[in-house]
Image: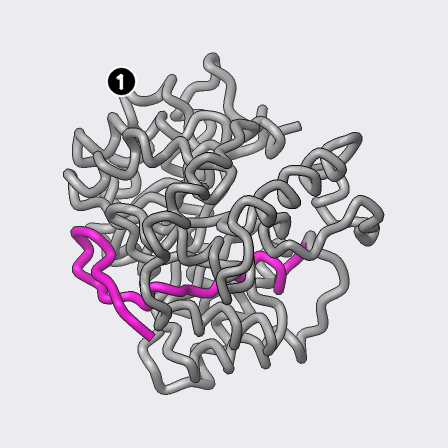
């Protein structure tokens, strides 16, 4: 396992982290036994960075991560995310920051995170979405800085709004955030245009999420794939989206040809090789995924001609996350 600096935080994190959404909720049947086995194997392989959130099972994922950390002797860094108070998702241009992320509300949320994670201080707290409507007066970060100064949070950031990831560029340049969690994959390449270079310039740590495009880039989906009731992919791939996605993936496979790597490995490495990226957090649900995903850390960079081919498969449809 290789390690990289998480921007200005100075933390050295494994370049492959553990995305802990699926062990909490929304991805179909998941046993706790499989979840803990996956977590432990990932740590055995050198993973020292786990990403979770309260909405992953109403705190279930956070509590499982806390249990794991108590069982292990290694230093494990944990990022969690707090959602805005009830209202439009994504926040509308007319939402007020003080209403969706008010100081009293954030204090309540942080107290809940601390309890679920069984800790006195959160390594990294991310606001679980944002809107550029708040950039001129980003009050929530003033509130979070108070909590940081009180020793309840070490570092602060944002999990980008799916439909407008560039909304955080101004925040990075103005020094409000230490870390950003960003969607980047073979289909979603927009951050390469400006967001990632600005993050590198401002020394903001970058966590890449959705590297598999919600499982599409594992290459395992077919036009006949059925998701369990309650699996969010029923919406994400609803209507004709599954068919369109599988067609896109088949074109991608044909273009890259045989190169000795599985599509999932290529997808992770493509994200990992981007400018300024600190870690990529694939969702990991079982021991096989833990072993396969962590092994990507030690692979050499993708060949330039393969990278050039991958760049041609950008597909702009981030609005799928909100529909």
Q: Up-down: is 164 above or below 2?
A: above
Q: Residue at x 29, y 66 (%)?
A: 13
Quarter assignment of residue 280: bottom left
Q: Position of residue 71 (x, y in %)?
A: 46, 85
The reply to whether residue 147 is in sight is: no
At 58% from the left and 70% from the top, the residue drawn is 289
Q: Residue furthest top?
A: 94
Query: Do we see residue 268 in this rendering?
Result: yes
Residue visible at 21% across and 60% down? 5
Residue 34, placed above or below residue 250: below
Q: State the residue in front, 84 or 177.
A: 177
**Magenta residues, as a range?**
1-25
Is 183 positioned to the left or the right of 74 in the image?
Answer: right
- Residue 139: horizontal and vertical position, in percent? 29, 28
Name above or below for residue 186 compared with residue 15.
Answer: above
Question: Does the magenta segment cover residue 235?
Answer: no
Label 1: which secondary element: loop
Tell me where residue 75 sits by quadrant: bottom left
Q: Measuring 83% from the left and 50% from the top, which residue is drawn there?
A: 226
Considering the image in quadrants, where does the N terminus appear?
bottom left
Q: Which residue is mark 1?
A: 136
């Amino acid at each position: 396992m290789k390690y990289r600096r998480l921007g200005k935080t100075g933390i050295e994190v494994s370049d492959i982290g553990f995305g802990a959404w699926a062990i909490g909720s929304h991805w179909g049947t998941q046993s706790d036994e499989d979840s803990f086995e996956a977590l432990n194997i990932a740590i055995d392989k050198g993973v020292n960075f786990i990403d979770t959130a309260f909405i992953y099972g109403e705190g279930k994922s956070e509590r499982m991560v806390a249990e794991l950390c108590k069982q292990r002797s290694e230093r494990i860094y944990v990022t969690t995310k707090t959602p805005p108070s009830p209202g439009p998702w994504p926040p509308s241009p007319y939402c007020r920051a003080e209403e969706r992320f008010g100081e009293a509300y954030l204090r309540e949320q942080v107290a809940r995170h601390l309890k679920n994670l069984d800790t006195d201080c959160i390594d990294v707290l991310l606001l679980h979405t944002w809107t550029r409507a708040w950039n001129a007066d980003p009050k929530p970060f003033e509130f979070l800085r108070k909590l940081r100064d009180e020793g309840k949070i070490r570092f602060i950031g944002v999990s980008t709004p799916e439909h407008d990831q560039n909304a955080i560029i101004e925040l990075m340049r103005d020094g409000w955030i230490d870390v950003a969690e960003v969607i980047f994959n073979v289909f979603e390449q927009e951050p390469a245009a400006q967001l990632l270079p600005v993050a590198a310039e401002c020394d903001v740590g970058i966590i890449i999420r959705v590297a598999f495009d919600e499982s599409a880039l594992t290459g395992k989906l077919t036009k006949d794939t059925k998701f369990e009731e309650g699996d969010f992919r029923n919406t994400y791939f609803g209507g004709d989206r599954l068919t369109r996605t599988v067609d896109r993936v088949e074109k991608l496979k044909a273009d890259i040809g045989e190169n000795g790597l599985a599509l999932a490995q290529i997808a992770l490495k493509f994200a990992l090789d981007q400018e300024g990226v600190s870690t990529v957090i694939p969702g990991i649900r079982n021991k096989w995924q833990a072993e396969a995903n962590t092994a990507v850390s030690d692979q050499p960079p993708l060949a330039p001609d393969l990278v050039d081919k991958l760049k041609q498969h950008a597909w702009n449809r981030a609005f799928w996350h909100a529909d």
